[in-house]
Amino acid sequence: MNTATRQVFDSSTPTHVAAFQSWRSMKTWVAIWLWYLNVLYWVGFFSLSRPEAVWAVISYLAVGPLIVLMITQQRGLTRLAGLIHVPWVPFTFYLGLRLFSDVLGPSLSIQDGTFYYLWLQLMFWSTLVCIGLDVMDVKRWFAGERYVLGTPAAFEVGASKLAPE
């Protein structure tokens, strides 16, 4: 990477503007993936009488303050943002135990409700994929890919689109 290429937004850019520009510069497939995950987690709000949905919602809400902190500290989105999904690790472990073992009681099945069971399966596998992608992103950040999405440095290596003006 050309070290002269700007890796962060200009310091005169307000943090909230830099964060918004960084968010809007994500690759389309990443934005679609994140919307899909959000919608998947929002479904939990309609099943709060079930413990798995409660834990899904708790883990989802725990991510909010972390993303605000991360975006504020990094002045936009970086690969380190993968750390925000740390609350999903214990939830995914719990959900895996509920779906695939009897450790925490009888494992869940289609008899617990077709929609609910399929939603939990989607939650488990989608969150597991997300955590895997997050691990790769955090490793890449520690390996030196510390640019903010939307900056020329991120665009130069194909990590994001240029930030909208």
Image (cartoon, grey):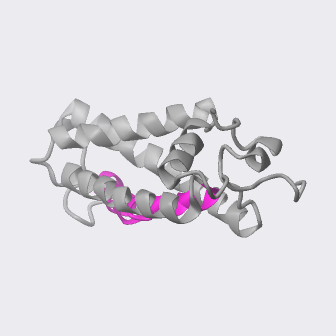
Q: Does the magenta stretch include residue 83?
A: yes
**Residue 36, image x, y percentages:** 43, 34
Name of the residue lying farthest toward the front: 12
Quadrant where the C terminus sits is top right
Q: Does the image show residue 112?
A: no
Q: Does the magenta stretch include residue 3?
A: no
**Residue 114, image x, y percentages:** 23, 31
Quadrant where the N terminus sits is bottom right
Quick check: 123 left or right of 153?
A: left
Q: In which quarter of the image is residue 147?
A: bottom right
Name of the residue lying farthest toward the left: 49
Quick check: 69 left or right of 59?
A: right
- Tell me the magenta residue range: 78-100
Q: Does the image show residue 50?
A: yes
Image: 71 above or below 122: below
In this rendered view, identify the residue nearer to me: 110 or 130: 130
Quick check: 45 left or right of 133?
A: left
In this rendered view, identify the residue nearer to me: 48 or 96: 48
Image: 42 above or below 107: above
In this rendered view, identify the residue nearer to me: 141 or 97: 141
Magenta stretch, main secondary structure class:
helix
**Residue 5, image x, y percentages:** 84, 52
Residue drawn at the location 59% of the way across and 44% of the way down: 22
Residue drawn at the location 52% of the way across and 49% of the way down: 19
